[in-house]
Amino acid sequence: MIQVNVTLTETIRVLLDEKKYSTLRDILITMKPFDIAAVFEELQDEKTPILFRILPKELAADSFVEMDEETQEFLIHGFSDSELKEIVDELFVDDAVDLIEEMPANVVKRILRQADKETRRQINELLKYPEDSAGSIMTTEFISLRPDMTAEMAIKRIRRTGVDKETIYTCYVNDENNRLIGITTVKDLLLAEDDASVRDLMEENVISVHTLDDQEEVARIFSDYDFLALPVVDNEQRIVGIVTIDDAIDVIREEATEDIEKMAAVLPSDKPYMRTSVLGIYKKRVPWLLVLMLSATFTSTIISSFDAMLASVIILSSFIPMITGSGGNAGSQASVSVIRALSLGEIEFKSMFKVLWKELRVAALCGLTLATANFIKLIFFDLRGYDNAVIIALVVSLTLVGTIIMAKIVGSGLPLLSSKIGLDPAVMANPLISTVCDSLSLLIYFGVASLLLGL
Amino acid sequence: MIQVNVTLTETIRVLLDEKKYSTLRDILITMKPFDIAAVFEELQDEKTPILFRILPKELAADSFVEMDEETQEFLIHGFSDSELKEIVDELFVDDAVDLIEEMPANVVKRILRQADKETRRQINELLKYPEDSAGSIMTTEFISLRPDMTAEMAIKRIRRTGVDKETIYTCYVNDENNRLIGITTVKDLLLAEDDASVRDLMEENVISVHTLDDQEEVARIFSDYDFLALPVVDNEQRIVGIVTIDDAIDVIREEATEDIEKMAAVLPSDKPYMRTSVLGIYKKRVPWLLVLMLSATFTSTIISSFDAMLASVIILSSFIPMITGSGGNAGSQASVSVIRALSLGEIEFKSMFKVLWKELRVAALCGLTLATANFIKLIFFDLRGYDNAVIIALVVSLTLVGTIIMAKIVGSGLPLLSSKIGLDPAVMANPLISTVCDSLSLLIYFGVASLLLGL
């Protein structure tokens, strides 16, 4: 839920009841679209369409875009066709598409009926692109220039056509076949001499993405190169749209959230937590819980197959959680580092052996530290006055070394492998890895135990 | 490590050996700073200063900013004082500060000696701000206008002074006391009539941050409101600098990585994985591993205090990993959702009870599902033909319900509480929570067992 100063919403509700419309207008026009949207979300009552009509056209459209689907749908139902048309005309095409993707079919029909022919064509174009593709997040409204223009002509053109463009600051230079041959910025145009030609001003080696490229790739380009917008081209290198940085930022956050969710064995959701229903959350979480519970059968089987040993040295079973726990933690530390490095594009599969070698050395250091600390702890505290305390302490400590090393290798190796075979590394993350680590660490434990205790 | 087409680096190395400088220049000027930086990082040899001299001044500075500290330091050592001065003069102040914060003292001295008096003053200003504060990531170079200017005058001023500003697109309007009274954009100025006054064009309710505000707050504002730059003001509401969106994006990524690392019990590091030494990684990971290992003492104590029960019904011990595992997973699912929602500003402590109530219902659903699945599994497979299989199955299944509910409450509650008392919620995350859950789930387990089995 977006946080907003509640008292303000309350005031607005009161003013609305008292029909103090001009006062309301004065309040609203001082506010940012994001905050206006928050107010509408909090109000959620049959009066909101009236409140919406008070807003100036452009501010109304900008605020509308920021609202959640529920509120948008609620408002649309309150709109007359002509009101709906006004909004749709004000929206940037990519925002209109986002809206349409969220709305139920009957609402979509109404929206499309209101859009003028050209807008409808553009919307349908964009709707064709697969979710999470560059095409699906681009806008088709941008400034295009010809190489033979002068800076002055270019600026004139921008001033004439700029008003309904999402950004005017990056301009795209196309040849007569509409192929993208360069980009230039308003900054360059303004700082240049009036008669300088766009051809001389433009940057010729343009970085662009294809309509079908993954939006994650788009986001990475934005943060690697400090762009404000990125051109999207089709197979013929013709520019079909641009992705603006505000959309790129949304992608960066979504992708980070998705990684985090996957690492915690939650199926990714694109809805904010507070707006997701209990059932919705349940559906995202229970599958992994089931998978992991069942996979724990391995550990159970392993343990019960050693129950003779456990029965004779019952104390051994009390260290199981500590050992599996340490293994799980060590493994997830490694996996998370690798997964994040992968999704930030810092490493690739080809650096697999560099990574494993690094993790091996880290694991050795961590393992020895933990084993030493543990040995001392066991001798002087937990196993004090216990018969063959030293041997048991030795068993546990040696197991720790083995477990940590195994866990770091598994934790760093699995994500890299899954990236290689085209699986999402994040899915390989913590819980799955800890299940693998649990089983292996138990095998190490009982192996070492039967060796040293001769059981 | 930044990925770069190795063959290109190879070619450049060869051309460098053959002293083909004009060819090298032709290659380099077609490249983006980010990629040039990558080449320098891969080359890492005594010839790189020569290669660097080939670059045009501005491109040189832009590429220099993108390089890692090692490469930067390496190059600086190769620079003559006058060369160093050229770079420092080209750098934006905030980049110069980043550089200085990375470099060893002797290099810093050299850099500051080269900077002209004004730059040095600005740098020292910025160095005063605490790490992760808005002040520490802002630049002091921005376009400021007066309200009584006309659009035409404003554009003229921008064309005159814009060249060394990091962004010209957002302009800041100050009164005679340098207090920030409004902002306007080049877009508005260009699309307005020449004689329109800046006062009429400017947006008066400006969102700004204080120099000492946390950079995470800055990042959130950028993604809530689609700004390209955000003004930073001092206690007297005087504008002292601006944060540009490219820096905001870096913050967004850093913060996400930090959250992820903390959730996996890794102390956050600001260095890319592949550039961090083995010892560096070890230092980030071993503290938590130790803490968690020692805290596992609780679980051990609990188990050994019930060893009589385990000895008599040895099979019980084989379900311990499955139960603690499910608890841990359920807990981290909840904690991660809450932590992410907190750091995206979707929820606050005040919604604590909403959250707990939500998690309680989710937990009930998950718990029942798992318990049912588990009961069937035990009866028909694991415990087949076992004496009092049903009771044991019942023990395990009931424990699961209790554990899941407990885990979801702990997992969602702890992060919220720690955010309340000013601790970082992410630190409360998975491993710590799973340790708590482990102990509690064991208590539930043995409690239920002694009840139903009458032990």
Image (cartoon, coloured by chain):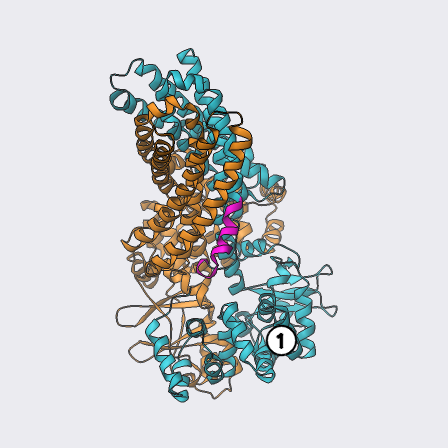
Chain colours: A orange, B cyan
x then y, percent, for residue B171: 60, 70
Measured as percent of width and height from the top left, residue B11 is found at 34, 79
Q: Is residue B428 magenta?
A: no
Give the x, y percent position of residue A410.
Answer: 35, 46
Give the residue at mark 1: B111
Q: Does residue A298 appear to the left or right of A54 in the view shown?
A: left
Q: Quick one: A148 or B343, which is closer to the camera?
A: B343
| Protein chain holding label 1 | B
Magenta stretch bounds: B273-287
Quarter of the picture containing the C terminus of chain B is top left
| Residue placed most toward the observer, A325 or A104 | A325
Quadrant, the N terminus of chain B? bottom left
What residue is rendered at 54% in x and 50% in y?
Answer: A36
A15 relative to B405 in the view: left or right: right
State which quadrant residue B405 falls in.
Answer: top left
Question: What is the residue that sits farthest to the top in this orientation?
Answer: B454
